[in-house]
Image (cartoon, helix red, strand yellow):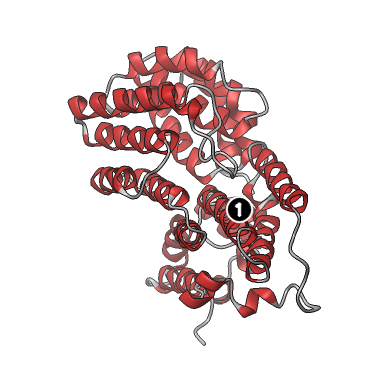
């Protein structure tokens, strides 16, 4: 088997006669973080692999090793399609002891409650704290579905699908896009096996989100439109899909198409309260989700002052406990103020959310934080910028 990135990194570092600390200074990462990567405890980001390769003169070996590691990780996640559709024997082995009585509704409700507790934790803490228990929950519920007759089987499959969809989101937040894509598609297959296309439709919204963060407007729009055309999704899911489509149009710079999709999303979300589903609500639970997305999109459209004004209002409505949403839209708010030249206000609003950003440890939030850092660097001698930069750098390079 080819050597892992960690092994190749150690080899090249020793050959270059550099300590971990010296290499960390060269690539501008913390010594602790780099040490974890070399010990195989953390996967390297693509950026880190490139920086280490250049610093150690590895001639592309470290970049290739990092990609090979990601490919192997994706292969390990892949399950046979038959297992996905039938819940499979392998996952069922976790529940030894032979057939069980049909589960009572209160037991299923207890598993839903356990999942909701993980969602609450996921809104406030690092994905690393919830990913392992989430994966275990999905596998347990999935395996139980194979042991129970209808309608219990369908209820369990749909619960497993909802859990898998959220697991995909946490993988994305951890910076693992391949894992996010696999779990998102796994959620869609579980939902179809359970006889419901709601999560299958929403999984396309989630895929569109992955494309949005890759700055791919065409793919974002295409996936969001597919989500609106497949099956008979609820008005809430249609609203989330239209919202994502609007963000794609904004990324592409198409103001007219953005406004039409955004207005459609607003009308749908207003009517969505009448929709009732048997499993936990899909997507963001933040208040005014369309208004938050509008504030986000206006920034992409170059209307920074409008974006800042809208987000100034909308961000204050996000509950204190929703740290992930507060960090996401709070950072975008700071970026809008910076892009509109309001440097002092950008720094004030950024300071307000740095603690949230540090706690949720979000790869997607850090993307916007890096953009804020690049924008504020134009005023690096400004007093407020000098004051906020140490805290900003700590979040950007936290282990």
Q: Position of residue 303 (x, y in %)?
A: 29, 19
Residue situated in front as seen by the camera: 378 or 14:
378
- Residue farthest along the right direction in this orientation: 97
Image height of 10 relative to 161, above or below? below
How many marks on residues?
Answer: 1
Residue drawn at (47%, 18%) of the image: 346
Tell which residue pokes out farthest to the bottom in this image: 1
User: In the rendering, at what x and y percent does residue 147 appear?
Assistant: 68, 71
Left-right relation of 259 to 168 = left
At a point 68% along the width and 58% down the height, the residue shown is: 137
* Residue lying furthest front: 150
Residue 302 is drawn in which quadrant? Answer: top left
Residue at the disc numbered 1: 159
Pinpoint residue 290: horizontal percent, then vertical percent.
Answer: 41, 25
Residue 362 showing in the rendered view: yes
Quadrant of the image occupied by residue 4: bottom right
Side (left or right) of 136 relative to 313: right
Pick the front one: 176 or 261:
261
In this rendered view, identify the residue nearer to me: 301 or 318: 318
To which quarter of the image does residue 24 belong? bottom right
The relative height of residue 225 versus residue 44 in the rendered view (above or below) is above
Q: Where is residue 107 shown, x and y percent of the image?
A: 77, 53
Q: Secondary structure at mark 1?
A: helix
Up the image or down, 124 lies above or below 306; here it is below
Q: Is residue 378 visible?
A: no
Q: At 60% from the left edge and 21% from the top edge, which residue is drawn?
A: 352
In the rendered view, does 306 fall on the left or right side of 139? left
Assess disc 1: are there few (<14), some (14-19) or many (≥20) residues with their C-alpha within 10 Å of its C-alpha.
many
């Amino acid at each position: 088997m080819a050597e892992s990135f960690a092994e190749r990194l150690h080899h090249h570092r020793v050959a270059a006669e550099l300590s971990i600390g010296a290499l960390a200074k060269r690539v501008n990462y913390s010594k602790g973080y780099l040490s974890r990567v070399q010990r195989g405890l953390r996967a390297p980001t693509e950026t880190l692999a490139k920086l280490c390769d250049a610093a150690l003169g590895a001639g592309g070996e470290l970049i290739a090793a990092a990609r090979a590691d990601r490919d192997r990780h994706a292969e390990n996640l892949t399950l046979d399609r038959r297992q996905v559709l039938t819940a499979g024997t392998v996952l069922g082995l976790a529940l030894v002891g032979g057939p069980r009585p049909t589960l009572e509704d209160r037991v299923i409700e207890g598993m839903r409650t356990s999942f909701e507790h993980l969602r609450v934790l996921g809104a406030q803490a690092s994905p690393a704290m919830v990913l392992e228990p989430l994966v275990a929950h999905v596998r347990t519920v999935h395996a139980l579905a194979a042991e129970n007759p209808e309608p219990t089987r369908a209820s369990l499959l749909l619960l497993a699908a909802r859990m898998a969809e959220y697991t995909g989101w946490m993988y994305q937040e951890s910076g693992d896009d391949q894992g996010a894509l696999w779990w998102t598609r796994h959620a869609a297959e579980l939902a179809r096996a359970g006889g419901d296309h709601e999560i299958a439709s929403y999984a396309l919204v989630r895929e569109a989100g992955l494309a949005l963060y890759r700055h791919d407007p065409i793919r974002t729009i295409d996936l969001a439109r597919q989500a609106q055309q497949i099956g008979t999704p609820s008005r809430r899911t249609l609203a989330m899909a239209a919202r994502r489509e609007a963000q794609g149009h904004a990324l592409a710079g198409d103001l007219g198409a953005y406004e039409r999709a955004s207005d459609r999303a607003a009308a749908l979300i207003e009517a969505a309260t009448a929709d009732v589903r048997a499993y936990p609500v899909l997507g963001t639970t933040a208040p005014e989700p369309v208004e938050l997305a509008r504030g986000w999109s206006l920034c992409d459209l170059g209307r920074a002052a409008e974006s800042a004004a809208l987000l100034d209002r909308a961000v204050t409505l996000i509950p204190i406990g929703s740290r992930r949403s507060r960090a996401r839209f709070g950072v975008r708010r700071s970026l809008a103020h910076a892009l509109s030249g309001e440097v002092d206000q950008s720094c004030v609003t950024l300071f307000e959310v740095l603690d949230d950003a540090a706690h949720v440890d979000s790869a997607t939030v850090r993307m916007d934080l890096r953009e804020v850092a690049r924008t504020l660097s134009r005023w690096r001698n400004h007093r407020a910028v000098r004051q906020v930069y140490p805290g900003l750098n700590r979040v950007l390079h936290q282990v």
